[in-house]
Image (cartoon, rainbow, N blue to C red):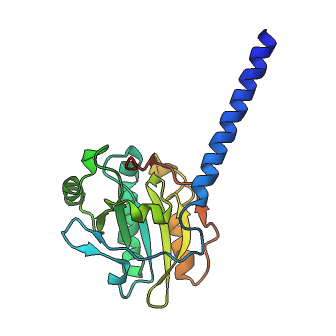
Protein backbone atom coordinates (compact mmCIF):
# COMPACT_ATOMS: atom_id res chain seq x y z
CA UNK A 1 0.00 0.00 0.00
CA UNK A 2 2.77 2.39 0.98
CA UNK A 3 4.62 1.61 -2.27
CA UNK A 4 1.50 2.43 -4.29
CA UNK A 5 1.11 5.75 -2.48
CA UNK A 6 4.73 6.64 -3.26
CA UNK A 7 4.24 5.78 -6.94
CA UNK A 8 1.02 7.82 -7.16
CA UNK A 9 2.67 10.75 -5.40
CA UNK A 10 5.58 10.59 -7.84
CA UNK A 11 3.23 10.58 -10.78
CA UNK A 12 1.32 13.58 -9.44
CA UNK A 13 4.56 15.51 -8.97
CA UNK A 14 5.63 14.65 -12.52
CA UNK A 15 2.29 15.79 -13.93
CA UNK A 16 2.52 19.03 -11.94
CA UNK A 17 6.02 19.72 -13.24
CA UNK A 18 4.95 19.02 -16.81
CA UNK A 19 1.93 21.31 -16.41
CA UNK A 20 4.07 24.16 -15.10
CA UNK A 21 6.56 23.67 -17.93
CA UNK A 22 3.76 23.63 -20.51
CA UNK A 23 2.26 26.78 -19.01
CA UNK A 24 5.61 28.56 -19.06
CA UNK A 25 6.23 27.46 -22.66
CA UNK A 26 2.84 28.73 -23.73
CA UNK A 27 3.57 32.00 -21.92
CA UNK A 28 6.83 32.35 -23.80
CA UNK A 29 5.21 31.69 -27.17
CA UNK A 30 2.54 34.41 -26.96
CA UNK A 31 3.07 38.02 -27.94
CA UNK A 32 6.18 39.42 -29.58
CA UNK A 33 9.39 37.49 -30.05
CA UNK A 34 12.89 38.85 -30.60
CA UNK A 35 13.10 40.35 -34.08
CA UNK A 36 9.36 41.00 -34.40
CA UNK A 37 8.06 44.43 -35.33
CA UNK A 38 6.01 45.96 -32.53
CA UNK A 39 2.83 47.80 -33.46
CA UNK A 40 2.33 51.34 -32.23
CA UNK A 41 -0.27 52.13 -29.57
CA UNK A 42 -2.15 55.18 -28.33
CA UNK A 43 -2.79 55.15 -24.59
CA UNK A 44 -3.81 57.80 -22.03
CA UNK A 45 -0.99 59.30 -19.98
CA UNK A 46 -1.12 60.65 -16.44
CA UNK A 47 -0.94 64.19 -17.87
CA UNK A 48 -4.30 63.75 -19.62
CA UNK A 49 -2.86 63.33 -23.12
CA UNK A 50 -2.49 60.22 -25.23
CA UNK A 51 0.98 58.90 -26.06
CA UNK A 52 2.17 56.89 -29.05
CA UNK A 53 5.60 55.74 -30.17
CA UNK A 54 5.11 57.91 -33.24
CA UNK A 55 5.15 60.99 -30.99
CA UNK A 56 8.90 60.50 -30.56
CA UNK A 57 10.16 61.50 -33.97
CA UNK A 58 13.85 61.62 -33.01
CA UNK A 59 13.90 58.49 -30.83
CA UNK A 60 16.30 55.68 -31.70
CA UNK A 61 14.23 53.21 -29.75
CA UNK A 62 12.25 52.71 -26.57
CA UNK A 63 12.30 51.03 -23.19
CA UNK A 64 8.69 49.88 -22.87
CA UNK A 65 8.00 48.74 -19.29
CA UNK A 66 4.79 47.08 -18.17
CA UNK A 67 4.55 47.96 -14.50
CA UNK A 68 2.09 49.12 -11.84
CA UNK A 69 1.61 50.91 -8.52
CA UNK A 70 0.94 47.87 -6.38
CA UNK A 71 3.38 45.04 -7.10
CA UNK A 72 6.24 44.82 -4.55
CA UNK A 73 8.67 43.96 -7.36
CA UNK A 74 7.51 46.96 -9.39
CA UNK A 75 8.17 49.14 -6.36
CA UNK A 76 11.62 47.63 -5.88
CA UNK A 77 12.47 48.35 -9.52
CA UNK A 78 10.87 51.80 -9.60
CA UNK A 79 14.04 53.79 -8.96
CA UNK A 80 15.93 51.69 -11.51
CA UNK A 81 13.27 52.40 -14.14
CA UNK A 82 13.60 56.10 -13.36
CA UNK A 83 17.39 55.84 -13.66
CA UNK A 84 17.07 54.13 -17.05
CA UNK A 85 15.03 57.05 -18.37
CA UNK A 86 17.43 59.62 -16.94
CA UNK A 87 20.39 57.83 -18.49
CA UNK A 88 19.01 56.87 -21.89
CA UNK A 89 16.20 59.27 -22.83
CA UNK A 90 18.77 61.87 -23.85
CA UNK A 91 20.54 59.20 -25.92
CA UNK A 92 17.38 58.35 -27.83
CA UNK A 93 15.93 55.50 -25.74
CA UNK A 94 13.22 56.92 -23.47
CA UNK A 95 11.18 54.89 -21.02
CA UNK A 96 7.47 54.43 -21.64
CA UNK A 97 5.74 52.82 -18.66
CA UNK A 98 2.38 51.08 -19.09
CA UNK A 99 0.03 49.90 -16.33
CA UNK A 100 -2.24 47.08 -17.58
CA UNK A 101 -3.67 45.80 -14.28
CA UNK A 102 -7.42 45.27 -13.95
CA UNK A 103 -8.53 47.95 -11.47
CA UNK A 104 -11.47 45.86 -10.27
CA UNK A 105 -8.83 43.61 -8.70
CA UNK A 106 -6.31 46.36 -7.96
CA UNK A 107 -8.11 49.69 -7.34
CA UNK A 108 -4.76 51.25 -6.41
CA UNK A 109 -3.76 50.93 -10.08
CA UNK A 110 -6.46 53.34 -11.28
CA UNK A 111 -5.49 56.35 -13.35
CA UNK A 112 -6.12 58.61 -10.35
CA UNK A 113 -3.64 56.64 -8.26
CA UNK A 114 -1.18 56.53 -11.15
CA UNK A 115 -1.30 60.33 -11.36
CA UNK A 116 -0.56 60.58 -7.64
CA UNK A 117 2.34 58.14 -7.78
CA UNK A 118 3.96 59.71 -10.83
CA UNK A 119 3.84 63.12 -9.12
CA UNK A 120 5.01 61.85 -5.75
CA UNK A 121 7.93 59.96 -7.26
CA UNK A 122 8.80 62.55 -9.90
CA UNK A 123 8.50 60.34 -12.96
CA UNK A 124 10.25 61.84 -15.97
CA UNK A 125 8.57 59.44 -18.39
CA UNK A 126 4.99 58.78 -19.54
CA UNK A 127 2.94 56.47 -17.34
CA UNK A 128 0.15 55.08 -19.49
CA UNK A 129 -3.07 53.27 -18.62
CA UNK A 130 -3.88 50.13 -20.68
CA UNK A 131 -7.51 49.69 -19.63
CA UNK A 132 -8.38 47.33 -22.48
CA UNK A 133 -5.19 45.32 -21.83
CA UNK A 134 -4.84 44.96 -25.60
CA UNK A 135 -1.33 46.43 -25.64
CA UNK A 136 -0.10 44.12 -22.88
CA UNK A 137 -1.61 41.14 -24.68
CA UNK A 138 -0.09 42.17 -28.02
CA UNK A 139 3.35 42.39 -26.44
CA UNK A 140 2.91 39.17 -24.49
CA UNK A 141 3.63 40.82 -21.16
CA UNK A 142 2.91 38.62 -18.16
CA UNK A 143 4.62 40.31 -15.20
CA UNK A 144 5.13 43.69 -13.57
CA UNK A 145 7.75 44.76 -14.35
CA UNK A 146 8.23 43.28 -17.84
CA UNK A 147 10.54 45.13 -20.24
CA UNK A 148 10.64 45.31 -24.04
CA UNK A 149 13.53 47.18 -25.64
CA UNK A 150 12.57 48.36 -29.11
CA UNK A 151 15.03 49.48 -31.76
CA UNK A 152 13.61 51.98 -34.24
CA UNK A 153 14.20 51.23 -37.90
CA UNK A 154 13.20 53.75 -40.52
CA UNK A 155 10.45 56.20 -39.65
CA UNK A 156 7.93 53.93 -37.98
CA UNK A 157 9.27 50.40 -37.54
CA UNK A 158 10.03 49.21 -34.03
CA UNK A 159 11.94 45.94 -33.84
CA UNK A 160 11.97 44.01 -30.57
CA UNK A 161 15.60 43.67 -29.44
CA UNK A 162 15.28 42.52 -25.84
CA UNK A 163 12.51 41.04 -23.64
CA UNK A 164 12.41 40.33 -19.94
CA UNK A 165 13.98 41.40 -16.68
CA UNK A 166 15.74 44.69 -16.00
CA UNK A 167 18.66 43.01 -14.24
CA UNK A 168 19.55 39.92 -12.22
CA UNK A 169 18.65 41.17 -8.73
CA UNK A 170 15.03 42.09 -8.10
CA UNK A 171 15.63 42.91 -4.44
CA UNK A 172 18.93 44.66 -3.82
CA UNK A 173 20.58 47.08 -6.24
CA UNK A 174 23.91 46.33 -4.54
CA UNK A 175 23.58 42.70 -5.61
CA UNK A 176 23.11 43.46 -9.31
CA UNK A 177 25.76 41.78 -11.46
CA UNK A 178 24.05 41.71 -14.86
CA UNK A 179 22.24 44.78 -16.22
CA UNK A 180 20.31 43.23 -19.08
CA UNK A 181 18.43 46.30 -20.28
CA UNK A 182 21.43 48.62 -20.04
CA UNK A 183 23.64 46.12 -21.85
CA UNK A 184 21.05 45.74 -24.61
CA UNK A 185 20.77 49.49 -25.13
CA UNK A 186 24.53 50.02 -25.07
CA UNK A 187 24.88 47.38 -27.77
CA UNK A 188 22.19 49.02 -29.90
CA UNK A 189 23.78 52.46 -29.48
CA UNK A 190 27.02 50.94 -30.72
CA UNK A 191 25.32 49.52 -33.78
CA UNK A 192 25.39 45.94 -32.52
CA UNK A 193 22.82 43.36 -31.52
CA UNK A 194 22.47 42.62 -27.79
CA UNK A 195 24.38 39.54 -26.68
CA UNK A 196 21.54 38.68 -24.28
CA UNK A 197 18.11 39.09 -25.84
CA UNK A 198 15.81 37.37 -23.34
CA UNK A 199 15.69 36.88 -19.59
CA UNK A 200 12.60 35.74 -17.75
CA UNK A 201 10.80 38.69 -16.17
CA UNK A 202 10.57 38.54 -12.38
CA UNK A 203 7.56 40.18 -10.79
CA UNK A 204 3.87 39.93 -10.00
CA UNK A 205 1.53 38.45 -12.56
CA UNK A 206 -0.51 40.98 -14.49
CA UNK A 207 -4.06 41.10 -13.14
CA UNK A 208 -6.15 40.19 -16.18
CA UNK A 209 -9.81 40.99 -16.56
CA UNK A 210 -12.14 38.04 -16.16
CA UNK A 211 -13.57 37.01 -19.52
Q: Residue at x 43, y 75 (%)?
A: 62
Residue 175 shows up from this direction = yes
Residue 180 shows up from this direction = no
Q: Position of residue 81 (x, y in %)?
A: 39, 61
Identify the residue at the far top of this view. Answer: 1
- Up-down relation of residue 57 to residue 30 (above or below): below
Q: Residue at x 36, y 87 (%)?
A: 57
- Up-down relation of residue 169 to residue 8 (above or below): below
Identify the residue at the far right of this view. Answer: 3
Identify the residue at the far bottom of this view. Answer: 154
- Up-down relation of residue 210 to residue 78 (above or below): above
Given residues 159 and 12, the one toward you in this image is: 12
Given residues 20 and 159, the one toward you in this image is: 20
Q: Is the N terminus in the top left, top right, bottom left or bottom right quadrant?
A: top right
| Relative to 34, 95 lies left or right | left
Q: Residue at x 38, y 88 (%)?
A: 58
Identify the residue at the far front of this view. Answer: 211
Q: Position of residue 6 (x, y in %)?
A: 76, 18
Amino acid sequence: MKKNIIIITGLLVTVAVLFVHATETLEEQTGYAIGDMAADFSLPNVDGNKVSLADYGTAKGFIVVFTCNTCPYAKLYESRIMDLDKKYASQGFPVIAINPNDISQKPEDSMEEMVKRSKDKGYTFPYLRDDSQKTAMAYGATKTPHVYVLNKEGKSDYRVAYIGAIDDSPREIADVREKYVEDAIEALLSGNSPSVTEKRAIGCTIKWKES
